[in-house]
Image: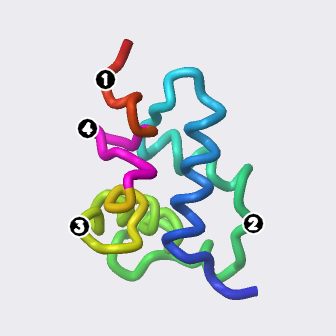
Amino acid sequence: MSRVTEAEVAEAAIKVLTDRATGRATIRELIEEIPNYLTLSAEDLAPSPTRPGEALWEQQVRNIASHKASPGNAIYEGKLVAIPGGLALPGCEVAA
């Protein structure tokens, strides 16, 4: 099984957020929940060479916000919104 793509991780994040009443989550919450929505390979679970204590796929969650100016990115495409410390569905940026 090959590694998941950033787009697949973003789609899993959208599913997590859709299942939340607020449509918002911190990066830590997303990292806790995404494995319930996405099958991760041994390669995905390998330690990140650049972020100690973090798996490669976890870095991809953070990359969603880092790559927001890139075409094809979920934020760039309007599917997600970066909020302080996390992500939200469009229209759910402000806490109720």
In contact (CB < 8 Å): disc 4 and disc 3: no
Looking at the image, tell me whether mark 3 or mark 2 is earlier in sequence order: 2
SS at mark 4 in the image: loop
Looking at the image, tell me whether mark 4 or mark 3 is earlier in sequence order: 3
> For the residues carrying marks 3 and 2, which lies nearer the camera in this image?
3
- Residue 15 position in % (x across, y down): 63, 46
Q: Which residues are magenta?
A: 78-88
Q: Colour mode?
A: rainbow
> For the residues carrying marks 1 and 4, which lies nearer the camera in this image?
1
Foreground residue among 47 and 15:
15
Amino acid type for the residue under numbered disc 1: Val
Give neighbour class at mark 1: few <14, some 14-19, many 20+ (Cα, 10 Å).
few
Which residue has dot 1 on it? Answer: 94
Looking at the image, tell me whether mark 2 or mark 4 is earlier in sequence order: 2
- Residue 68 position in % (x across, y down): 28, 62
In contact (CB < 8 Å): disc 2 and disc 1: no
Which residue has dot 3 on it? Answer: 69
Residue at coordinates 40% horizontally, 28% vertically from top-left? 92
Where residue 24 sits, quadrant-wise, is: top left
Amino acid type for the residue under numbered disc 2: Thr
In contact (CB < 8 Å): disc 3 and disc 2: no
Which residue has dot 4 on it? Answer: 84
Q: CA distance from mark 3 to mark 1?
A: 21 Å
Instruction: Tell me if 68 is positioned left or right of 37 in this view.
Output: left
Give neighbour class at mark 4: few <14, some 14-19, many 20+ (Cα, 10 Å).
few
Q: CA distance from mark 2 to mark 4?
A: 27 Å
Q: Which mark is residue 39?
A: 2
- Residue 86 position in % (x across, y down): 36, 42
Q: CA distance from mark 2 to mark 1?
A: 31 Å
Amino acid type for the residue under numbered disc 4: Pro
Instruction: Tell me if 41 is positioned left or right of 21 in this view.
Output: right
